[in-house]
Image (spheres, rainbow, N blue to C red):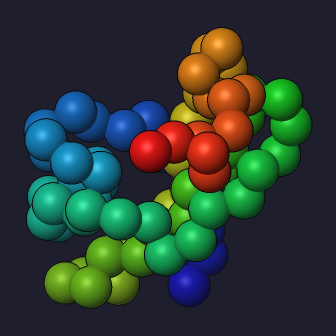
Amino acid sequence: MAQRMVKVRSDSEFGTTCDKCGMALIVPKWSEYVSDGLVLNFWSCTQCGFQFETEAFVRATADADRDFSMAR
């Protein structure tokens, strides 16, 4: 089945919604860090089999650079 980039609807509180059947998808099948701030998510609907990719733009924060391994 061919993949395609789709515009994501924000119907779901978590993850996204399948553009073909409307099923709530909680977590992508896989994600790929592409570049600074850009992550591609690959989704596969378990109900209808529709597969698609979305882009997520993640803004870096000062907290993201902190090392939490020393937290008590």
Q: Number of labelled discs?
A: 0
Q: Is 43 displayed left or right of 1 in the figure?
A: left
- Residue 11's image quarter? top left
Residue 65 percent coordinates (x, y):
72, 28
Quadrant in the picture for the N terminus? bottom right
**Can residue 5 be seen by looking at this rendering?**
no
Q: Nearer the viewer, residue 18 or 2?
A: 18
The answer to whether 24 is drawn above or below residue 72 in the figure is: below
The residue that appears at 13% across and 41% down in the rendered structure is: 13
The answer to whether 15 is drawn above or below residue 60 in the figure is: below
Quadrant in the picture for the C terminus? top left
Residue 42 percent coordinates (x, y):
56, 65
The answer to whether 64 is drawn above or below residue 51 in the figure is: above
Q: Is 33 displayed left or right of 3 in the figure?
A: right
The residue that appears at 42% across and 76% down in the rendered structure is: 44
Q: Is 38 displayed left or right of 48 in the figure?
A: right
**Can residue 27 be seen by looking at this rendering?**
yes
Q: Nearer the viewer, residue 63 or 2?
A: 63
Residue 60 percent coordinates (x, y):
67, 20
- Residue 7's image quarter? top left
For the view shown, which residue lies furthest in the top direction? 62
For the view shown, which residue lies furthest in the right direction? 35
The residue that appears at 66% across and 14% down in the rendered structure is: 62
Residue 47 percent coordinates (x, y):
19, 84
